[in-house]
Each structure stands twice: as structure tokens, then as C-alpha cells.
Amino acid sequence: MKKSDLEKLLKEQSAAVLPAEETRKRIKRDLGIVDLPAEEKEAERDFAYAPAPAAAGAGRRTGATRNGQRHLPLPAVIAFAAVAVLLIVAVVFSLLPKNTPLPKPGGTADKFSEIKTTDDFYAYGAASVGTLLRSSGTSAATAYAAAPLSAQALGHSALSAQPRAAYGNQEESGLTEEQIETLNRYMPLAEELLSDGKIAHADTSVPAALENEYAYGMKVSYTELTGGAVTYYMYYNKIMLSSDSEDGESEEEYALEGVLVVEGMQYAVKGEQEIEIEEDESESEMSFTAVTGPNSTLRVHREYETEGSETEQKFIYTVTENGKETESVELEYEQEDGETELKMTVRRDGEEDVLTLRNRSENGNLRFTAQGRIGGKDVSFTVEIVTDTSGNTSYVYTLDDQQFDFDRPDFDDDEDDDEDEEDDRRGNRGDRGD
Amino acid sequence: MKKKLLEQKIREYKTGDKRAFDAIYDMTYKAVYFRILYVVRDKMYAEDILHDAYLRAMEHLDSYREDTDFIAWLSRIGKNLALNFLEKKKREVQTDFQEEEYRFSAKEPELPWLFSLAQKILSEEEYEILMLCQISGYKRREVADMLSLPIGTVTWKNNEALKKLKKHLEKENKEAGI
């Protein structure tokens, strides 16, 4: 066969490959561009062009039909989803009290049980992983977070904390500094999980700089125990697994790939889910992973099992550094004496520590109690959130009359500052640039 | 230069002259379409995604930075939509014969087999250049301009793609005893 024969063969078949002219017409119609009859075209030039419809709505083909499947045009799907989510959010917010009440002792809501949909899970993943990334921002993480992550070798811990002032003797307290540091990294998350407020999520527009890459935006927010609002933004693409529509409400199961913006930094994230159903048993695993460096990740995955009417679920956070798993923390809600408590199991260096935390906040005094077994020893202590005269907050751990004071990450949430808000949305303070 | 004309038409469209769309479409759709087709490997789906890509691009034209590379920008939108679509499709339909469909399919293939074969054995860039040079009727200089590549690269990739196709066809013919 000669090269020219092949070229000829390709050319002969071009009509069967190139898109039909109908595609152009469909695009124009949906953009509101009307082809005028030839005789009117000339006259039309003398007039200002009528504005196109704001959205490609009226007259749009609702989707190609193929193999019995209908494909809604993407903008229509986005618009529909946005309206549906806005309606749901509007209803949820209308039912919420206008002012966030101070937490009641033992009145903690089980946030895991509030996770009903794929969106809820990813919102939870974004909120909890965002909080852990933020809590690491008090020390080493600041250094890596301020630089592009894509191709930079990171030789230090993805998550670490730093004591601000320890005025106790850690050896006497029975806990090592490392143990308290580990615990301190998870305190903001425990605080979030033991507070009353809900983790809210809503659709948001994708900033222009990311619009080419991501189709969806989600704003995730919750209120801290101190009353401060925490907001994260996530921009992503959906990889649809299934969708179902019932009573006018649609439910989607999807994987995602995108970025999470935490304190102005973008972290690459992905979400995955697997569901297995057998007779009256079902197992579901969902995960949300943030890339913290080359071969380093922070991942949360949910294990959810139902057997008959019984349901069990737990959330496991795994830190991987340079391809090796260095730490995992399992979180579970438990009920004891009618109160909700949070059980935290930390696995690191082949050892397992277990702590049970309860929210004991009262009259504006924000306090947790913790009991468990750390380093093979039974421990019992309290953690208090203390605000200094400048408004900065810290965690004060009290163990056997010893006190340890650790930084608590304050969220920069000056809603009045448009530039900051825009930075938070786009991740301007450290664009990955890849 | 076509790119200058394209940028001019984009400006006209942005200022409200929707008649500029036809010129924009004519100068861009083949490059965008083949980028999509390479991913989804189905003409009808590619047409649907092409439709969605233009809708999205034209409705968000303000986010395109003028005088950069409109075709690359639009192609990226098209490719992202195609990848999302494909991921969804992969989960919905899985057939054992999908990989070898171009050879063994009992039904009429969506695309002529030669194109399915090209999609299978060529890299994305080789495929796109081959399609633009051989199917779309563009001169290599025009393709180079369109894809912001040196003309030498376009010529070389086009020849490489033809060689690969030819070699594969000859091998198949030999195996089939033709």
C-alpha cells in the first residue's frame, strides 16, 4: 500500500467522520442566534442586534436520544442542579435558628448521621480534611502550603502541630510531646464533630480562572464552637456513577476530581465511592483524598455497613507521606448515658491510642473531657478553648494539674473583606499553577 | 493570519454581534471536534459534546483572555467534557468486545474502521494532526497555525501517523492472507 493510497482512503471517508451541519444549527439555536432569511439579512445589519436570551433555554434540544438514553445538555443539567440545591438549602436555612445557639452540654449532634447523599459526604470530606489541613497550617504546613505542590519535593510532615507555651512537665503528665501533638492536630476536627452546628453546603459558581477546568463549585461551611464561621470552597468535575430521580428530586452518585481551597491554598482532591448490596446487607465505602505533596495525601474514608435495621459507620483519616502510611485516626460516635461522645482511635508507629471525647461546654466556657488509653497508660484530661485579649484562641490541656497550651487555628473569615473572600474562593495565595 | 481574524470575530461576538459566530465556528470546530472524537470514539456523542462545548464557551466568553489561544481554550473545554462523559459511560456500559470493536463488531460501527483504528494506535496529537491534514482539508501551515506548533512538527507527525497506520494495515493484511 502506498502512502498516497492511504491519504486517498482517508479523504474518501471524511464525510462520514466530520460533524453534521445540523450540529452548528443546534448550537446557534441554543445560543439564541437566529439565521434570518437572505433578504432580511441585509436589512438586519442596519439595526442593533437584539440581545440573545440570557441562557440557552428556550427551544433548546433537550438532548440527543441514543440507545434509549437521553443526554441533557450540560448547561441545562447545571442549571437544574443549581436550582434544586438552592431550593434545598433555602428550606434548610429557613428551618435553622437565626442565631447559632451556644452548645448545650452533651447536646452534640451526630454529624455522621446527617450524611445522606453523595454531596453530603463530599461536603463533609471537604470540611473535615480542610480543617485538618488548616490545623496543620500553624507550623510546617505553612511552608509547603505557600509553595506550589505539583512538582515540589516535600521532605517534612504533612501534618504537624507546635506547642505555643507548655507550662507543664510532659513526662510527669504521662504523655509525650509527640502524643499531645498528635492529639492536638485532631482537636479542631473533634471540636467540629462535637459542636451543634451543621456542615452546610451549597452550589457556588466556579471562578473564571478555574472555569476551563472545573464544572462545579461547592461552598462548604460550618460554625465553630467559638461562634466563628468557617468556609471552604471546592471546584470539581463529576464522574457520574449513577443517577436516580424520584418525586421530582434527583439523586446522583458520582466520583469527583478537583481542588479544595483552604486558607487561599489549592489542594488537589478526589472523591470515590463503592457500594455493594447483597440481599438485606449493604456495604458502602466513600473516600475523599487531598494531595498534600508528591506521594503524600490526607484521606478520609467512610465505612458504612447496614444489616437489617442496624447501621454502623465510622470515618478513618489516613496520612500518607512519601507513599507510606504514617498515621491513621478512626472516628466513631458512641452513645453513653444518653450522651453523644466521640471515640478516637489513633494508630501510629505500630501503636494504638484510644480516646473518648465529650463536649462539656457551658455558659460560654468551651471545654471537652477526654478519657482513654494512650501509650499503654490510662489517661483522663480536659481541653479548654481559651481566648486571649487579642482574640487569639488556644487549646489548653489539663492533665494531672499540668497544663499545656497549644495554638488553635483561627479561621480568617472576614466576610467584609472582598479581596480575602475572593482569595479564599480562588486559592490566590498559592496557585498550584499546573 | 487566521488567528487575527478569529480574535477579531471573538471581539465582535463579545460586543453583541452574534453573526460572528459562524466565522468563529468555521475556524475552530474541526480542531475541537477531533479532540473530542479521539476521546469518545463515537460520532454522535462527539457531536453532542461539541454542541455543549460551544454553548459553554460562548456563554462564558468573558473568561477567555483575548489574544491568547482560543482554539486551545475551546479544545480544553471540549476535552474535559468528553472525559467526564466517557467516565460516566464507562461505568454505565461495559462490553467485552469494546476493545476490539473496530475489528469484530457485528453491528455497523459508528465510524469507518480506518478511523477507529487510527484512534486506537495513534497518540492524541498524531491523530489530531492526521485528521486536520487529511480529513479536514487544511494545509499543514494552517494546522501549524491552528495548533500553535512549528510547521516541521506538523509535517513530521502527519507522516509518522500515516506510517503507523500503513504499517498496521499491512500487518493485518498479511495475517489475513490478503
Image (cartoon, rainbow, N blue to C red):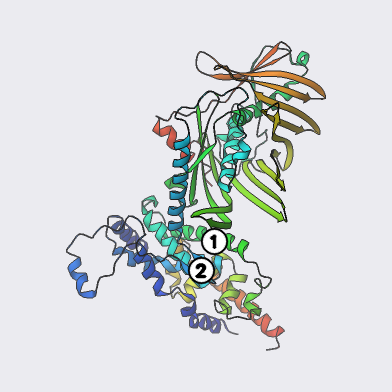
Estimate the x, y position of residue A21 in percent, counting from the top left.
Answer: 39, 74
Chain letter for the residue marked with disc 1 in the picture: B
Residue that extends furthest to the bottom in the rendered view of this protein: B178
Estimate the x, y position of residue A36 in percent, counting from the top left.
Answer: 25, 70
Estimate the x, y position of residue A167 in percent, counting from the top left.
Answer: 67, 11
Q: Amino acid at mark 1?
A: Phe
Chain letter for the residue marked with disc 2 in the picture: B
Rendered image: mark on residue B45 = 2
The CA span between labels 1 and 2 is: 9 Å
Q: Residue at x 48, y 52 (%)?
A: A215
Instruction: Determine whether A14 is above or below A224 in the image.
Output: below
Q: Residues within 10 Å of mark 2 (few under 14, many from 20)?
A: some
Q: Residue at x 46, y 79 (%)?
A: A15
Secondary-structure class at tag 2: helix
Q: Residue at x 43, y 65 (%)?
A: A62
Q: Residues within 10 Å of mark 1 (few under 14, many from 20)?
A: some
Secondary-structure class at tag 1: helix
Q: Are marks 1 and 2 in contact (CB under 8 Å)?
A: yes
Estimate the x, y position of residue A338 in percent, counting from the top left.
Answer: 68, 28
Rendered image: mark on residue B85 = 1
Comes first in the chain, label 1 or label 2: 2
Nearer-the-camera pick, A270 or A334:
A334
Q: Amino acid at mark 2?
A: Tyr
Q: Is residue B140 left or right of residue A343?
A: left
Nearer-the-camera pick, A292 or A347:
A347
